[in-house]
Protein backbone atom coordinates (compact mmCIF):
# COMPACT_ATOMS: atom_id res chain seq x y z
CA UNK A 1 0.00 0.00 0.00
CA UNK A 2 1.08 3.59 -0.60
CA UNK A 3 1.35 6.17 2.16
CA UNK A 4 -2.10 6.97 3.52
CA UNK A 5 -3.70 10.28 2.48
CA UNK A 6 -5.05 12.69 5.07
CA UNK A 7 -8.66 11.82 5.92
CA UNK A 8 -11.37 13.73 4.11
CA UNK A 9 -14.20 15.26 6.10
CA UNK A 10 -16.36 12.22 5.28
CA UNK A 11 -13.68 9.72 6.32
CA UNK A 12 -13.09 11.62 9.56
CA UNK A 13 -16.84 11.69 10.20
CA UNK A 14 -17.04 7.89 9.76
CA UNK A 15 -14.12 7.47 12.16
CA UNK A 16 -15.76 9.77 14.72
CA UNK A 17 -19.05 7.90 14.34
CA UNK A 18 -17.30 4.57 14.94
CA UNK A 19 -15.80 5.93 18.15
CA UNK A 20 -19.32 6.70 19.43
CA UNK A 21 -20.29 3.03 19.18
CA UNK A 22 -19.83 0.35 21.84
CA UNK A 23 -18.10 -3.01 21.63
CA UNK A 24 -20.90 -5.60 21.68
CA UNK A 25 -19.08 -8.77 22.75
CA UNK A 26 -15.88 -10.49 23.96
CA UNK A 27 -13.53 -9.14 26.65
CA UNK A 28 -14.16 -5.46 25.91
CA UNK A 29 -17.96 -5.68 25.80
CA UNK A 30 -19.64 -2.37 26.63
CA UNK A 31 -16.49 -0.29 26.18
CA UNK A 32 -16.34 2.52 23.69
CA UNK A 33 -15.10 1.28 20.34
CA UNK A 34 -11.69 2.43 19.15
CA UNK A 35 -10.62 1.78 15.57
CA UNK A 36 -7.27 0.10 15.15
CA UNK A 37 -4.86 1.79 12.72
CA UNK A 38 -5.51 -0.71 9.90
CA UNK A 39 -9.28 -0.10 10.21
CA UNK A 40 -8.79 3.66 10.27
CA UNK A 41 -6.47 3.51 7.27
CA UNK A 42 -9.00 1.45 5.31
CA UNK A 43 -11.82 3.89 6.12
CA UNK A 44 -9.63 6.87 5.23
CA UNK A 45 -8.69 5.38 1.87
CA UNK A 46 -12.22 4.13 1.09
CA UNK A 47 -13.97 7.45 1.73
CA UNK A 48 -11.39 9.80 0.24
CA UNK A 49 -13.70 10.41 -2.73
CA UNK A 50 -14.02 8.68 -6.09
CA UNK A 51 -13.56 5.12 -4.77
CA UNK A 52 -16.08 2.61 -6.14
CA UNK A 53 -14.49 -0.66 -4.98
CA UNK A 54 -12.56 -1.13 -1.74
CA UNK A 55 -10.94 -4.44 -0.79
CA UNK A 56 -9.64 -5.35 2.66
CA UNK A 57 -8.04 -8.81 2.90
CA UNK A 58 -6.76 -9.96 6.29
CA UNK A 59 -6.51 -13.23 8.21
CA UNK A 60 -9.48 -14.58 10.12
CA UNK A 61 -10.51 -13.18 13.50
CA UNK A 62 -9.12 -9.72 12.83
CA UNK A 63 -12.41 -7.83 13.40
CA UNK A 64 -13.68 -8.17 9.84
CA UNK A 65 -17.27 -8.54 11.08
CA UNK A 66 -16.94 -5.48 13.34
CA UNK A 67 -15.60 -3.43 10.43
CA UNK A 68 -18.58 -4.48 8.29
CA UNK A 69 -21.02 -3.55 11.09
CA UNK A 70 -19.48 -0.08 11.52
CA UNK A 71 -19.94 0.70 7.83
CA UNK A 72 -23.50 -0.67 7.83
CA UNK A 73 -24.56 1.49 10.78
CA UNK A 74 -22.80 4.54 9.36
CA UNK A 75 -24.82 4.09 6.16
CA UNK A 76 -28.12 3.46 7.99
CA UNK A 77 -27.91 6.20 10.59
CA UNK A 78 -24.56 7.97 10.45
CA UNK A 79 -22.41 10.09 8.14
CA UNK A 80 -22.75 7.74 5.15
CA UNK A 81 -26.56 7.91 5.27
CA UNK A 82 -28.61 8.90 2.23
CA UNK A 83 -32.37 8.84 2.77
CA UNK A 84 -34.21 5.73 1.54
CA UNK A 85 -30.97 4.03 0.51
CA UNK A 86 -30.44 0.27 0.60
CA UNK A 87 -27.33 -1.29 2.09
CA UNK A 88 -26.56 -4.97 1.50
CA UNK A 89 -24.06 -7.35 2.99
CA UNK A 90 -23.60 -10.55 0.97
CA UNK A 91 -22.20 -13.83 2.27
CA UNK A 92 -21.82 -17.29 0.78
CA UNK A 93 -24.05 -19.07 3.28
CA UNK A 94 -27.04 -18.30 5.49
CA UNK A 95 -24.87 -18.98 8.50
CA UNK A 96 -22.26 -16.41 7.48
CA UNK A 97 -24.95 -13.86 6.57
CA UNK A 98 -26.48 -14.36 10.01
CA UNK A 99 -23.12 -13.64 11.69
CA UNK A 100 -22.93 -10.15 10.15
CA UNK A 101 -26.63 -9.45 10.81
CA UNK A 102 -26.45 -10.54 14.45
CA UNK A 103 -23.30 -8.49 15.07
CA UNK A 104 -25.05 -5.40 13.71
CA UNK A 105 -27.99 -6.09 16.04
CA UNK A 106 -25.68 -6.51 19.04
CA UNK A 107 -23.82 -3.31 18.23
CA UNK A 108 -27.12 -1.40 17.99
CA UNK A 109 -28.18 -2.65 21.43
CA UNK A 110 -24.76 -2.12 23.04
CA UNK A 111 -24.63 1.43 21.69
CA UNK A 112 -28.11 2.36 22.98
CA UNK A 113 -29.55 2.83 19.50
CA UNK A 114 -32.38 0.28 19.55
CA UNK A 115 -35.08 2.97 19.50
CA UNK A 116 -33.95 4.15 16.06
CA UNK A 117 -34.30 0.81 14.26
CA UNK A 118 -36.76 -1.92 13.37
CA UNK A 119 -35.14 -5.37 13.24
CA UNK A 120 -36.74 -8.21 11.27
CA UNK A 121 -34.93 -11.43 12.10
CA UNK A 122 -36.96 -13.60 9.74
CA UNK A 123 -35.71 -11.68 6.71
CA UNK A 124 -32.44 -10.42 8.28
CA UNK A 125 -33.32 -6.79 7.68
CA UNK A 126 -32.75 -3.66 9.73
CA UNK A 127 -34.59 -0.44 8.88
CA UNK A 128 -34.25 3.09 10.20
CA UNK A 129 -37.73 4.68 9.89
CA UNK A 130 -36.34 8.15 10.58
CA UNK A 131 -34.42 8.12 7.28
CA UNK A 132 -36.09 5.28 5.34
CA UNK A 133 -32.79 3.40 5.09
CA UNK A 134 -32.70 -0.39 4.92
CA UNK A 135 -29.97 -2.96 5.52
CA UNK A 136 -30.35 -6.52 4.18
CA UNK A 137 -28.08 -9.48 4.93
CA UNK A 138 -28.15 -11.83 1.93
CA UNK A 139 -26.65 -15.20 1.13
CA UNK A 140 -25.94 -17.05 -2.09
CA UNK A 141 -27.89 -20.01 -0.70
CA UNK A 142 -31.10 -17.98 -0.36
CA UNK A 143 -31.20 -17.03 -4.06
CA UNK A 144 -32.54 -13.62 -3.00
CA UNK A 145 -32.88 -11.02 -5.73
CA UNK A 146 -32.50 -7.26 -5.26
CA UNK A 147 -35.28 -5.36 -6.98
CA UNK A 148 -34.03 -1.89 -6.02
CA UNK A 149 -30.83 0.05 -6.44
CA UNK A 150 -28.13 -0.59 -3.83
CA UNK A 151 -26.09 2.28 -2.38
CA UNK A 152 -23.44 0.25 -0.57
CA UNK A 153 -22.78 -3.46 -1.03
CA UNK A 154 -20.42 -5.26 1.34
CA UNK A 155 -19.18 -8.69 0.22
CA UNK A 156 -18.25 -10.69 3.31
CA UNK A 157 -15.72 -13.54 2.83
CA UNK A 158 -15.77 -13.39 -0.97
CA UNK A 159 -12.67 -15.59 -0.82
CA UNK A 160 -15.00 -18.56 -0.42
CA UNK A 161 -16.11 -18.21 -4.06
CA UNK A 162 -14.31 -20.81 -6.16
CA UNK A 163 -13.54 -19.79 -9.74
CA UNK A 164 -13.55 -16.32 -11.33
CA UNK A 165 -17.32 -15.79 -11.54
CA UNK A 166 -20.23 -15.71 -9.11
CA UNK A 167 -23.90 -15.07 -9.83
CA UNK A 168 -24.63 -13.19 -6.58
CA UNK A 169 -21.56 -10.98 -6.95
CA UNK A 170 -22.55 -10.11 -10.53
CA UNK A 171 -26.17 -9.40 -9.55
CA UNK A 172 -25.20 -7.05 -6.74
CA UNK A 173 -22.49 -5.29 -8.77
CA UNK A 174 -25.06 -4.42 -11.43
CA UNK A 175 -27.50 -3.22 -8.73
CA UNK A 176 -25.05 -0.50 -7.68
CA UNK A 177 -25.70 1.73 -10.70
CA UNK A 178 -28.54 3.78 -9.19
CA UNK A 179 -26.20 6.07 -7.21
CA UNK A 180 -23.35 8.12 -8.60
CA UNK A 181 -21.33 7.46 -5.43
CA UNK A 182 -22.31 3.81 -4.96
CA UNK A 183 -19.65 1.71 -3.28
CA UNK A 184 -18.66 -1.95 -3.30
CA UNK A 185 -16.69 -3.12 -0.27
CA UNK A 186 -15.02 -6.53 -0.06
CA UNK A 187 -13.70 -7.77 3.30
CA UNK A 188 -12.32 -11.29 3.25
CA UNK A 189 -9.53 -13.73 3.89
CA UNK A 190 -7.74 -14.59 0.64
CA UNK A 191 -9.09 -17.17 -1.80
CA UNK A 192 -7.15 -20.43 -2.28
CA UNK A 193 -5.99 -19.91 -5.89
CA UNK A 194 -5.08 -17.19 -8.38
CA UNK A 195 -8.06 -18.21 -10.51
CA UNK A 196 -10.68 -17.49 -7.85
CA UNK A 197 -12.82 -14.35 -8.02
CA UNK A 198 -11.30 -12.54 -5.04
CA UNK A 199 -7.76 -13.19 -6.30
CA UNK A 200 -8.68 -11.84 -9.73
CA UNK A 201 -10.14 -8.68 -8.13
CA UNK A 202 -7.14 -8.18 -5.82
CA UNK A 203 -4.59 -8.68 -8.60
CA UNK A 204 -6.48 -6.29 -10.88
CA UNK A 205 -6.76 -3.70 -8.12
CA UNK A 206 -3.03 -3.88 -7.33
CA UNK A 207 -1.89 -3.69 -10.94
CA UNK A 208 -4.45 -1.57 -12.82
CA UNK A 209 -3.53 1.87 -11.35
CA UNK A 210 -7.26 2.65 -11.19
CA UNK A 211 -8.02 5.33 -8.56
CA UNK A 212 -11.58 4.06 -8.21
CA UNK A 213 -10.29 0.78 -6.72
CA UNK A 214 -8.23 0.39 -3.55
CA UNK A 215 -6.74 -2.77 -2.08
CA UNK A 216 -5.46 -3.23 1.47
CA UNK A 217 -3.85 -6.68 1.55
CA UNK A 218 -2.33 -8.10 4.74
CA UNK A 219 -0.56 -11.36 3.96
CA UNK A 220 2.52 -13.25 5.10
CA UNK A 221 5.44 -13.85 2.70
CA UNK A 222 4.82 -16.93 0.55
CA UNK A 223 7.87 -18.85 1.79
CA UNK A 224 7.69 -17.93 5.48
CA UNK A 225 8.09 -20.47 8.27
CA UNK A 226 4.97 -21.41 10.20
CA UNK A 227 6.45 -20.09 13.46
CA UNK A 228 7.64 -16.77 11.97
CA UNK A 229 6.11 -14.15 14.27
CA UNK A 230 6.78 -11.32 11.84
CA UNK A 231 4.76 -13.27 9.26
CA UNK A 232 1.93 -13.65 11.79
CA UNK A 233 1.91 -9.89 12.34
CA UNK A 234 1.92 -9.16 8.61
CA UNK A 235 -1.34 -11.06 8.10
CA UNK A 236 -2.93 -10.22 11.47
CA UNK A 237 -2.87 -6.44 11.98
CA UNK A 238 -5.11 -6.78 15.07
CA UNK A 239 -2.45 -8.89 16.81
CA UNK A 240 -0.53 -5.88 18.13
CA UNK A 241 -3.62 -4.57 19.90
CA UNK A 242 -4.58 -7.74 21.75
CA UNK A 243 -7.71 -8.37 19.71
CA UNK A 244 -6.05 -11.40 18.06
CA UNK A 245 -4.74 -13.75 20.75
CA UNK A 246 -1.01 -14.50 20.42
CA UNK A 247 -1.35 -17.67 22.50
CA UNK A 248 -3.97 -18.97 20.08
CA UNK A 249 -1.64 -18.35 17.12
CA UNK A 250 1.16 -20.18 18.91
CA UNK A 251 -1.10 -23.17 19.51
CA UNK A 252 -2.29 -23.27 15.88
CA UNK A 253 1.25 -22.88 14.50
CA UNK A 254 2.61 -25.69 16.69
CA UNK A 255 -0.28 -27.89 15.61
CA UNK A 256 0.43 -27.19 11.93
CA UNK A 257 4.13 -27.99 12.39
CA UNK A 258 3.31 -31.28 14.13
CA UNK A 259 0.65 -32.29 11.61
CA UNK A 260 1.42 -31.47 7.94
CA UNK A 261 -2.26 -31.93 7.09
CA UNK A 262 -2.97 -28.73 9.06
CA UNK A 263 -0.38 -26.56 7.29
CA UNK A 264 -2.56 -25.56 4.34
CA UNK A 265 -5.44 -24.33 6.49
CA UNK A 266 -3.00 -22.43 8.75
CA UNK A 267 -1.44 -20.69 5.77
CA UNK A 268 -4.82 -19.77 4.25
CA UNK A 269 -6.78 -18.75 7.36
CA UNK A 270 -4.03 -17.47 9.67
CA UNK A 271 -1.29 -16.25 7.29
CA UNK A 272 -3.83 -15.10 4.65
CA UNK A 273 -1.94 -16.81 1.85
CA UNK A 274 -3.44 -18.24 -1.34
CA UNK A 275 -3.45 -21.86 -0.28
CA UNK A 276 -6.27 -24.36 -0.57
CA UNK A 277 -7.15 -25.53 2.92
CA UNK A 278 -6.90 -29.21 1.97
CA UNK A 279 -3.97 -31.51 1.21
CA UNK A 280 -1.88 -30.03 -1.57
CA UNK A 281 -0.25 -32.24 -4.14
CA UNK A 282 2.40 -29.65 -4.95
CA UNK A 283 2.61 -26.40 -3.00
CA UNK A 284 2.12 -23.32 -5.20
CA UNK A 285 5.47 -21.84 -4.18
CA UNK A 286 7.31 -25.01 -5.23
CA UNK A 287 5.44 -25.15 -8.53
CA UNK A 288 6.14 -21.47 -9.27
CA UNK A 289 9.84 -22.01 -8.60
CA UNK A 290 9.88 -24.26 -11.69
CA UNK A 291 8.43 -21.72 -14.13
CA UNK A 292 11.63 -21.46 -16.16
CA UNK A 293 11.39 -21.11 -19.93
CA UNK A 294 10.72 -24.23 -21.97
CA UNK A 295 13.55 -25.05 -24.38
CA UNK A 296 11.84 -26.26 -27.57
CA UNK A 297 15.15 -27.54 -28.95
CA UNK A 298 15.45 -29.97 -26.04
CA UNK A 299 11.97 -31.29 -26.83
CA UNK A 300 12.57 -31.51 -30.56
CA UNK A 301 15.90 -33.25 -30.09
CA UNK A 302 14.32 -35.73 -27.70
CA UNK A 303 13.83 -38.32 -26.64
CA UNK A 304 10.38 -37.15 -25.50
CA UNK A 305 8.09 -39.01 -23.16
CA UNK A 306 4.36 -38.40 -23.40
CA UNK A 307 1.18 -38.65 -21.40
CA UNK A 308 -2.33 -38.60 -22.86
CA UNK A 309 -5.41 -38.08 -20.71
CA UNK A 310 -8.61 -38.38 -22.72
CA UNK A 311 -11.80 -36.77 -21.55
CA UNK A 312 -15.43 -37.37 -22.17
CA UNK A 313 -16.55 -35.81 -25.41
CA UNK A 314 -17.31 -32.43 -23.81
CA UNK A 315 -14.47 -31.96 -21.32
CA UNK A 316 -10.70 -31.36 -21.47
CA UNK A 317 -8.30 -33.69 -23.25
CA UNK A 318 -4.63 -33.15 -22.42
CA UNK A 319 -1.38 -34.29 -24.05
CA UNK A 320 1.99 -33.70 -22.38
CA UNK A 321 5.58 -34.17 -23.53
CA UNK A 322 8.72 -34.01 -21.40
CA UNK A 323 12.38 -34.20 -22.40
CA UNK A 324 15.55 -33.88 -20.37
CA UNK A 325 18.30 -31.38 -21.10
CA UNK A 326 22.00 -32.22 -20.58
CA UNK A 327 21.85 -30.13 -17.38
CA UNK A 328 19.22 -32.47 -15.93
CA UNK A 329 16.20 -30.16 -16.29
CA UNK A 330 13.00 -31.71 -17.62
CA UNK A 331 11.27 -29.40 -20.10
CA UNK A 332 7.49 -29.89 -20.19
CA UNK A 333 4.98 -28.87 -22.85
CA UNK A 334 1.24 -29.46 -22.51
CA UNK A 335 -1.50 -29.22 -25.15
CA UNK A 336 -5.12 -29.02 -24.05
CA UNK A 337 -8.09 -29.66 -26.36
CA UNK A 338 -11.83 -29.09 -25.90
CA UNK A 339 -14.99 -28.49 -28.00
CA UNK A 340 -15.66 -24.93 -29.14
CA UNK A 341 -19.47 -24.73 -29.05
CA UNK A 342 -19.87 -25.51 -25.33
CA UNK A 343 -16.81 -23.62 -24.11
CA UNK A 344 -18.62 -20.67 -22.50
CA UNK A 345 -21.12 -22.90 -20.74
CA UNK A 346 -18.35 -25.11 -19.34
CA UNK A 347 -16.36 -22.04 -18.27
CA UNK A 348 -19.25 -21.18 -15.95
CA UNK A 349 -19.57 -24.77 -14.73
CA UNK A 350 -15.81 -25.20 -14.20
CA UNK A 351 -15.49 -21.71 -12.69
CA UNK A 352 -12.62 -20.59 -14.87
CA UNK A 353 -11.89 -18.35 -17.84
CA UNK A 354 -11.29 -20.68 -20.76
CA UNK A 355 -11.57 -17.87 -23.33
CA UNK A 356 -8.52 -16.10 -21.92
CA UNK A 357 -6.46 -19.29 -22.13
CA UNK A 358 -7.74 -19.88 -25.65
CA UNK A 359 -6.59 -16.38 -26.65
CA UNK A 360 -3.17 -17.12 -25.11
CA UNK A 361 -2.83 -20.24 -27.26
CA UNK A 362 -2.91 -22.55 -24.25
CA UNK A 363 -6.26 -24.13 -25.09
CA UNK A 364 -7.18 -25.45 -28.54
CA UNK A 365 -10.80 -25.94 -29.54
CA UNK A 366 -12.21 -28.27 -32.14
CA UNK A 367 -15.42 -27.48 -34.06
CA UNK A 368 -18.70 -28.66 -32.60
CA UNK A 369 -20.05 -29.47 -29.16
CA UNK A 370 -18.05 -32.68 -28.58
CA UNK A 371 -14.44 -33.75 -29.13
CA UNK A 372 -14.07 -35.15 -32.63
CA UNK A 373 -11.66 -38.07 -32.23
CA UNK A 374 -10.72 -37.98 -35.91
CA UNK A 375 -9.75 -34.31 -35.49
CA UNK A 376 -7.84 -35.21 -32.31
CA UNK A 377 -5.99 -38.07 -34.01
CA UNK A 378 -4.86 -35.74 -36.80
CA UNK A 379 -3.77 -33.08 -34.29
CA UNK A 380 -1.72 -35.59 -32.30
CA UNK A 381 -0.12 -36.72 -35.52
CA UNK A 382 0.85 -33.13 -36.37
CA UNK A 383 2.45 -32.66 -32.95
CA UNK A 384 4.30 -35.98 -33.22
CA UNK A 385 5.93 -34.89 -36.49
CA UNK A 386 7.77 -32.09 -34.63
CA UNK A 387 9.15 -34.15 -31.74
CA UNK A 388 11.14 -37.33 -31.18
CA UNK A 389 8.68 -39.30 -29.08
CA UNK A 390 9.89 -42.42 -27.28
CA UNK A 391 6.63 -43.49 -25.66
CA UNK A 392 3.18 -42.08 -24.79
CA UNK A 393 1.54 -43.36 -21.62
CA UNK A 394 -2.23 -43.30 -21.88
CA UNK A 395 -5.33 -43.87 -19.81
CA UNK A 396 -7.21 -46.74 -21.43
CA UNK A 397 -10.56 -44.95 -21.07
CA UNK A 398 -11.90 -44.05 -24.55
CA UNK A 399 -8.62 -45.16 -26.17
CA UNK A 400 -10.27 -47.85 -28.32
CA UNK A 401 -12.27 -45.19 -30.13
CA UNK A 402 -9.24 -42.93 -30.57
CA UNK A 403 -7.08 -45.77 -31.87
CA UNK A 404 -9.66 -46.54 -34.55
CA UNK A 405 -9.49 -42.92 -35.71
CA UNK A 406 -5.67 -42.96 -35.60
CA UNK A 407 -5.68 -45.99 -37.91
CA UNK A 408 -8.19 -44.26 -40.17
CA UNK A 409 -6.02 -41.15 -40.66
CA UNK A 410 -2.73 -43.06 -40.70
CA UNK A 411 -1.25 -41.87 -37.41
CA UNK A 412 1.06 -44.37 -35.70
CA UNK A 413 2.31 -43.42 -32.24
CA UNK A 414 4.29 -45.44 -29.65
CA UNK A 415 1.43 -45.95 -27.18
CA UNK A 416 1.64 -47.73 -23.82
CA UNK A 417 -1.25 -48.30 -21.44
CA UNK A 418 -0.95 -46.65 -18.03
CA UNK A 419 -3.26 -47.78 -15.22
CA UNK A 420 -5.11 -45.16 -13.20
CA UNK A 421 -5.36 -47.10 -9.94
CA UNK A 422 -3.14 -46.79 -6.89
CA UNK A 423 -0.69 -49.46 -8.03
CA UNK A 424 0.21 -47.88 -11.36
CA UNK A 425 -0.50 -44.19 -10.85
CA UNK A 426 1.35 -43.84 -7.55
CA UNK A 427 4.72 -43.81 -9.34
CA UNK A 428 3.47 -41.13 -11.73
CA UNK A 429 2.44 -39.01 -8.73
CA UNK A 430 5.86 -39.54 -7.14
CA UNK A 431 7.81 -38.90 -10.36
CA UNK A 432 6.28 -35.49 -11.04
CA UNK A 433 6.50 -34.46 -7.41
CA UNK A 434 10.19 -35.45 -7.24
CA UNK A 435 11.32 -33.31 -10.19
CA UNK A 436 9.44 -30.33 -8.75
CA UNK A 437 10.91 -30.80 -5.26
CA UNK A 438 14.39 -31.00 -6.81
CA UNK A 439 13.83 -27.94 -9.02
CA UNK A 440 14.38 -30.09 -12.13
CA UNK A 441 11.25 -29.07 -14.06
CA UNK A 442 10.72 -26.15 -16.48
CA UNK A 443 7.05 -25.62 -17.31
CA UNK A 444 7.16 -22.03 -18.58
CA UNK A 445 4.64 -20.67 -16.06
CA UNK A 446 1.66 -21.99 -18.04
CA UNK A 447 -1.36 -20.65 -16.05
CA UNK A 448 -3.73 -23.34 -17.32
CA UNK A 449 -1.33 -26.04 -16.13
CA UNK A 450 -0.87 -24.23 -12.81
CA UNK A 451 -4.65 -24.14 -12.35
CA UNK A 452 -4.85 -27.86 -13.04
CA UNK A 453 -2.05 -28.69 -10.59
CA UNK A 454 -3.78 -26.59 -7.92
CA UNK A 455 -6.99 -28.56 -8.55
CA UNK A 456 -5.36 -31.89 -7.74
CA UNK A 457 -6.59 -33.65 -4.63
CA UNK A 458 -4.79 -36.77 -3.47
CA UNK A 459 -6.25 -40.13 -2.47
CA UNK A 460 -4.24 -42.73 -0.53
CA UNK A 461 -4.71 -46.46 -0.07
CA UNK A 462 -3.88 -48.43 3.07
CA UNK A 463 -0.30 -48.97 1.84
CA UNK A 464 0.33 -45.24 1.35
CA UNK A 465 0.15 -45.35 -2.46
CA UNK A 466 -1.26 -42.18 -3.99
CA UNK A 467 -3.33 -41.25 -6.99
CA UNK A 468 -5.18 -38.20 -8.24
CA UNK A 469 -8.71 -37.98 -6.84
CA UNK A 470 -11.21 -37.26 -9.62
CA UNK A 471 -14.33 -37.14 -7.46
CA UNK A 472 -14.60 -33.33 -7.69
CA UNK A 473 -15.64 -33.28 -11.33
CA UNK A 474 -15.46 -29.53 -11.88
CA UNK A 475 -11.84 -29.39 -10.69
CA UNK A 476 -10.25 -30.23 -14.02
CA UNK A 477 -7.00 -32.12 -13.48
CA UNK A 478 -6.52 -33.56 -16.98
CA UNK A 479 -3.39 -31.49 -17.85
CA UNK A 480 -1.81 -32.44 -14.50
CA UNK A 481 -2.65 -36.12 -15.08
CA UNK A 482 -1.14 -36.06 -18.56
CA UNK A 483 2.06 -34.49 -17.24
CA UNK A 484 2.32 -37.03 -14.39
CA UNK A 485 1.94 -39.92 -16.85
CA UNK A 486 4.60 -38.37 -19.09
CA UNK A 487 7.03 -38.16 -16.17
CA UNK A 488 6.24 -41.75 -15.23
CA UNK A 489 7.23 -42.85 -18.72
CA UNK A 490 10.43 -40.83 -18.48
CA UNK A 491 11.84 -42.42 -15.35
CA UNK A 492 13.71 -45.73 -15.40
CA UNK A 493 12.98 -48.58 -12.97
CA UNK A 494 16.10 -47.51 -11.04
CA UNK A 495 14.77 -43.92 -10.87
CA UNK A 496 11.40 -45.23 -9.73
CA UNK A 497 12.94 -46.95 -6.72
CA UNK A 498 14.92 -43.84 -5.81
CA UNK A 499 11.85 -41.61 -6.13
CA UNK A 500 9.74 -43.90 -3.95
CA UNK A 501 12.41 -43.79 -1.27
CA UNK A 502 12.76 -40.03 -1.43
CA UNK A 503 9.03 -39.27 -1.32
CA UNK A 504 8.19 -41.95 1.22
Image: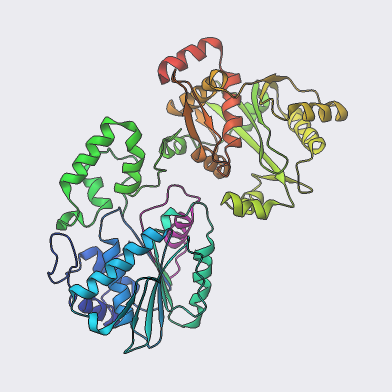
Quadrant for the N terminus in the image: bottom left
Q: Is residue 187 magenta?
A: yes
Q: What span is in magenta?
A: 186-211
Q: Nearer the viewer, residue 379 or 153?
A: 153
For residue 207, which quarter of the picture? bottom left
Q: Position of residue 175 (x, y in %)?
A: 51, 75
Q: How many marks?
A: 0
| Above or below: residue 301 compared with residue 376 | above
Residue 228 shows in the view:
yes
| Front residue of 312 and 178 | 312
Extreme residue toward the top, this view: 494
Task: Please tell me which residue is depicted at 32% across the width and 45% down the height of the picture.
Answer: 221
The quadrant the C terminus occupies is top left
Q: Determine the residue positioned at 40% across, 47% down.
A: 274
Q: Position of residue 100 (x, y in %)?
A: 32, 65
Can residue 46 be found in the magenta stretch? no
Query: Image check: 340 left or right of 151?
Result: right
The image position of residue 200, as x and y in percent, is 48, 56
Q: Residue at x 28, y 78 (%)?
A: 11
**Residue 154 point in image, percent of width and height:** 39, 68
Q: Give the residue at x 76% y 23%.
A: 413
Left or right of 297 on screen, residue 52: left
- Image quadrant where residue 217 sits: bottom left
Extreme-front residue of the structure: 122
- With 425 as the anchor, is 233 left or right in this view? left
Amino acid sequence: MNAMPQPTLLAQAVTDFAHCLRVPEADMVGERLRLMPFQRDFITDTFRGGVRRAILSIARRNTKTATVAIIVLAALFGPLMIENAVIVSAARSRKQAAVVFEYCCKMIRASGLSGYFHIRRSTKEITCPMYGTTYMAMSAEAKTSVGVGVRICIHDELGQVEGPQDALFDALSTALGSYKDSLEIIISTQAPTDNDLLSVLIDDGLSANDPSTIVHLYTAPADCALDDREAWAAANPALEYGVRDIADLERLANQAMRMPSQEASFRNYILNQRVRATEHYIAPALWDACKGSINEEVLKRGPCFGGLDLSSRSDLTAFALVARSPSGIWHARVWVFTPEDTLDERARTDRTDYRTWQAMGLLETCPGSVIDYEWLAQRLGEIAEEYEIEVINFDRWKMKELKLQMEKVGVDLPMEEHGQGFKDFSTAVDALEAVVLNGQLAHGGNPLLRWSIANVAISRDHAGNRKFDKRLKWRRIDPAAALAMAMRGAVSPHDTANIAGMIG
